[in-house]
Image: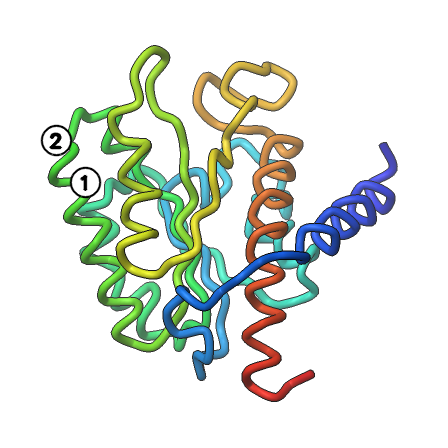
Amino acid sequence: MNPTLGISLALLLIVCGCRGERFDTIRNVGSAGETIICFGDSLTEGVGAEPGEEYPTILSRLLGMRVLNAGHRGDTTARALQRVRTSVVAKNPRLVILLLGGNDFLRQVPTRETRENLKEIVRQIQAHGAMVAIAGIKLGLFTDEYGPIFEETAAEFGAIYIPQVMKGIFNDTKLKSDQIHPNSAGYRLIAERIAQKIKPLLNEADRLRGRL
């Protein structure tokens, strides 16, 4: 597919997805922050992608906004929590997109610890006045003990939930660069799924801030 056509189709999906969305439960919609930050592990950093094709860069193109990549390969939720102030809070975020948990699963971190770490990350970001989006991923072939953590945390803290951003990627070799990481096409799919959910939120935030 022509890359320009692909982006156009993705934007059409985003526009169509705007209808019927409600954001009255999302905290900090009127955020005074200026930066959109993608915060996570290697899936955010873009391991396996061609240069300029990691999901935060593609997301920036889809939204027509600057997006900061704060991904760091190998991060568990515990390691991410240790750097949330310097990598996120210190950069005046407006919206922070969290994509974490894969390394907790691989290292068999107890789900209770993962849940508490994720909650504390969200607390610190929201305390600064930023909106939070939590990307969900299904971890494990037969069970999904970690999966509910993402949706439940989003519901508890008034964050927007983006379901199953890796759906269909783990088991499709055409979308992967190795056993774990997407390739450029896989990251494009992640970016499109995230954009479809957060674009309406940003539009509503702009309306509240009197930008439209």
Per the model, the C-alpha gap separating discs 2 and 1 is 7 Å
Quadrant housing the C terminus: bottom right
Q: State the residue position of label 2.
A: 110
Q: What element carries label 1?
A: helix
* Place of residue 69 in the rendered image (x, y in percent of width and height, measured from the top left): 48, 56
Q: Residues within 10 Å of mark 1 (few under 14, many from 20)?
A: many
Given residues 121 and 49, the one toward you in this image is 121
Give the answer, above or below, for where 3 lies relative to 25.
above
| Amino acid bearing label 1 | Thr
Q: State the residue position of label 1.
A: 114
170 left or right of 104? Answer: right
User: Pointer 2 and pointer 1: residues touching (CB < 8 Å)?
Assistant: yes
Q: Which residue is drawn at 70% across and 52% down?
A: 14
Outermost residue to the front:
20
* Place of residue 25 in the rendered image (x, y in percent of width and height, measured from the top left): 40, 64
Give the answer, above or below, for where 90 lies relative to 68.
below
Residue 185, labelled with which disc?
none
146 left or right of 161? Answer: left
Q: Residue at x 39, y 77 (%)?
A: 92
* Place of residue 7 in the rendered image (x, y in percent of width and height, measured from the top left): 78, 47
71 left or right of 36? Answer: left
Given residues 78 and 46, the one toward you in this image is 78
Quadrant housing the N terminus: top right
Q: Is mark 2 on a helix, strand or loop?
A: loop
Q: How many labels does the image show?
A: 2
| Amino acid bearing label 2 | Pro
Give the answer, above or below, for where 137 lies relative to 14.
above
Write down the quadrant of residue 210 in the picture.
bottom right
Q: Residue at x 55, y 85 (%)?
A: 209
Write down the quadrant of residue 108 in the picture.
top left
Chosen colour scheme = rainbow
Given residues 3 and 21, the one toward you in this image is 21
